[in-house]
Image (cartoon, rainbow, N blue to C red):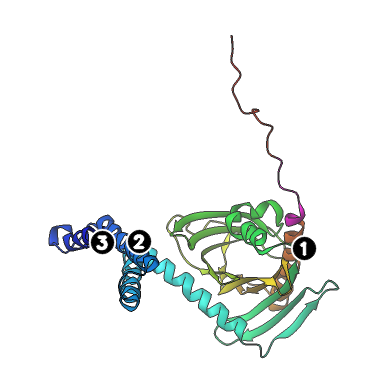
Amino acid sequence: MLPATFKLCAAISYQNLRNMTGLRRQAAVAISQELSKLACRGAGPSAWVSQVRRRSSLLSSRLEEQLFSEVEMSYIRQGEEALQKSLSILGDQDGWKTETVLGNGDRVLSKVLPDVGKVFRLEVVVEQPLAAVYGELVDNMEQMGDWNPSVQQVKILQKIGKDTVITHEKAAATPGNVVGPRDFVSVRCSKRRGSTCVLAGVATTHGAMPEQEGVVRAENGPTCMLLRPLPGSPSHTRLTWLLSIDLKGWLPKTVVNQVLAQTQVDFANHLRQRLAQPPPAAPPEGCNRQKHVN
């Protein structure tokens, strides 16, 4: 099988076949599978097998990149840059000021950054496993308006690969309409690093959602949510949310800061309530079957 695989790879060296992405990807996958079999059987020098497997993996990643257009790759890079920027901010422990501390241990911190402005950091523990929290925040993203009163609607405008999405979010009016209608267009990137899940985002533009009349287009700065199992209690999740938003318009900074800090506190409470709800019951067996008419 391995000689035949290399013949397949040799075939794609011809100019008329070089642009056949599917064939190149098939060759890379075939090589990887055969090398895995060799490694399991102990056939061939292990160092050589490892070296070719690394090169095969690199080839596969390059082929994946070729599946995206330049515009899509630009969105992917925006999301990854937001992720790196957010992690850098969270990694610097100096200069954080306490805004709010609740009796259950929830707390909101803040810091002023020269190139970003004021950012807020929510730190909470949710009594649910990481998979449940991740599923609600990522897999069920478009249902957020059902349980978070601060959000009117979240709509996915475009999916790019398995890690990147472009979203449009409408914010609900604040009590007393202190902050008028706002909406956001963001690129969001989700990654998993070991037992840690990182959900990052930043403001972007998208042709499917230009600015709306009567609604202020606000902007997310680098934002990020970190989800990690609580040490010693894997059924609990430690959630850290970095929030950076420019609400635009003529709003006093004191009002904006108060609204954003309260938004984070409320979010934690609503998320807990959502996750505490039992999953919807499955319909009785056969209830969806059509009745036969004699």
Left or right of 182 on screen, residue 46:
left
Question: Whole-percent x and y of residue 29?
Answer: 33, 60
**86, 176: nearer the viewer:** 86
What's the distance in space between the residues labelled 3 and 1, CA to CA?
57 Å
Q: Residue visible at 43% across and 59% down?
A: 160
Q: Earlier in the sequence, mark 2 or mark 1?
A: 2
Q: Nearer the viewer, mark 3 or mark 1?
A: 3
Q: On the image, numbered disc 2 is attached to which residue?
A: 33
Left or right of 225 on screen, residue 233:
right
Question: Whole-percent x and y of residue 10?
Answer: 17, 63
Q: Residue visible at 62% across and 61% down?
A: 134
Badge 2: few (under 14), some or many (20 or more) residues near its Cα, within 10 Å? few
Query: Is 134 situated above or below 112?
Result: above
Question: Whole-percent x and y of residue 280?
Answer: 71, 43
Per the rendered image, the range of residues in magenta is 274-281
Can you see residue 70? Answer: no
Q: Which residue reaches farthest front?
A: 42
Q: Quadrant of the N terminus?
A: bottom left
Residue 24: image quadrant is bottom left
Q: On the image, numbered disc 1 is attached to which residue?
A: 269
